[in-house]
Amino acid sequence: GYDAVLMDLPGLTNNVSYNGLWAARNVIAPVEAGPFEAEQADQLRQDVEQIVETFDVNVKLAMVLPNKVDERTKLAEEYLDAFRTAYPEAIAPSHIPYSQDIRNATEQGQTAFRLSKPSKTAKQAREAFITDAQALAKRLRGAT
């Protein structure tokens, strides 16, 4: 009776990740703006394609979600552009900016939405999370 179940799968190809992808059918991939993470996202795409081809099931990369983006760097923007090019149908409409405020909240067992006085970046992150959640819900409704 669930509309969605979130699973945090390992970032490598193994039986656990294959079984998780098979069960999920709609995959959300949070990805940081870096070379290792870009390789992991590409491997995930290959794994999804292999499952679809091998087992004839409908598994898709529903959203690539750039996360912890340090907007002060040119490199982050280059990775965002690369993700937009590599995943035009799956890229989230908003990226999640890096926010020390969110890291601090997490250490206290809270979310960005529970912060009483969020920083500018925490506010931006909350807005991006809402925008992306709405876009994901729309994509998933279209997938059924």
Image (tube, rainbow, N blue to C red):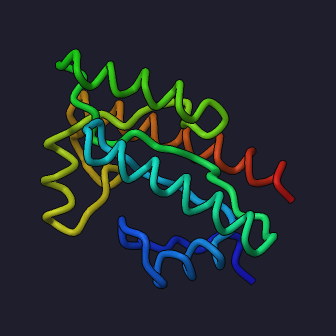
Q: Residue at x 74, y 46 (%)?
A: 139
Vertical comparison of 111 with 16: above or below? above
Give the quarter of the image for residue 95: top left
State the residue at coordinates (57%, 82%).
19
Residue 62 x, y percent position in the rendering = 64, 50
Which picture quadrant has residue 33?
top left
Left or right side of 3 for 56: right
Count of all numbered marks drawn on residues in the image? 0
The one of 54 and 131 positioned closer to us in this rendering = 54
Q: Is residue 91 left or right of residue 140?
A: left
Q: Which residue: 36% across, 47% down?
A: 39
| Relative depth, front residue between 123 and 69 | 69
Farthest top residue in view: 74
Q: Is residue 13 above or below residue 60?
A: below
Residue 72 point in image, percent of width and height: 18, 19
Quadrant position of the C terminus in the picture: bottom right
Please tell me in which quadrant of the rendered image residue 9 appears.
Answer: bottom left
Give the quarter of the figure containing the N terminus: bottom right
At x 43%, y 78%, the residue is: 14
Q: Nearer the viewer, residue 27 or 93?
A: 27
Question: Residue 103: x and y, percent?
Answer: 17, 52
Q: Is residue 90 left or right of residue 35?
A: right
| Residue 115 at x, y percent in the picture | 26, 50
Left/right of residue 64 with respect to residue 114 in the rendered view: right
